[in-house]
Amino acid sequence: MESKIEVLSTVKIQQSPDLYKIVDALNRTLKEKDLMFGLALDQDDQNKAIFTIYRT
């Protein structure tokens, strides 16, 4: 079985220590809707984070 992950949206936002809590809550709440959320620090600007929404 092949798993395909589709990027729906990506946005660069100001980094905050609690952003991961929002991403965790979204992942726990919406996994049944085949949605997944990611958060990564921007490699060019450590003050920015990249928030991504995926369809699984």
Image (cartoon, rainbow, N blue to C red):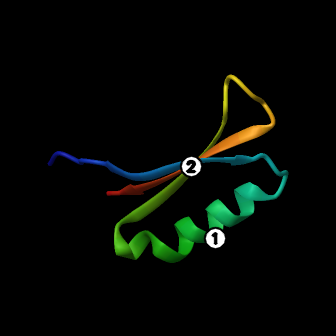
- Height in image: 42 above or below 39? above
Quadrant in which the C terminus is drawn: bottom left
- Left or right, 7 with respect to 23, comes to left
- Left or right, 26 with respect to 30, comes to right
Kindly identify which residue carries mark 2. 11
| Residue at 81%, 58% in the rendered image | 18
Badge 1 local density, few (<14 within 10 Å), some, or many (20+)?
Answer: few
Which disc, if any, is residue 34? none
Near-viewer residue (44 or 34): 44
- Left or right, 27 with respect to 48, comes to left
- Left or right, 19 with respect to 4, comes to right
> How far apart are the two marked residues, 1 and 2, measured between alpha carbons?
18 Å
- Height in image: 43 above or below 6? above
Residue 20 in the image, given as x and y percentages of width and height? 71, 55
Residue 19 in the image, given as x and y percentages of width and height? 74, 57
Q: What secondary structure is found at the residue carrying circle 1?
A: helix
Disc 2 marks a residue whose amino acid type is Val
In the picture as drawn, the residue positioned furthest to the left comes out as 1
Badge 2 local density, few (<14 within 10 Å), some, or many (20+)?
Answer: few
Q: State if disc 2 and disc 1 touch (CB < 8 Å).
A: no
Q: Earlier in the sequence, mark 1 or mark 2?
A: 2
In the picture as drawn, the residue positioned furthest to the right comes out as 17
Which disc, if any, is residue 25? 1
Disc 1 marks a residue whose amino acid type is Ala
Near-viewer residue (44 or 6): 44
**Count of residue discs:** 2
Q: Nearer the viewer, mark 1 or mark 2?
A: 2
| Residue at 74%, 28% in the rendered image | 45
Q: What secondary structure is found at the residue carrying circle 2?
A: strand
Residue 36 in the image, given as x and y percentages of width and height? 45, 59
| Residue at 67%, 32% in the rendered image | 42
Residue 27 in the image, given as x and y percentages of width and height? 54, 65
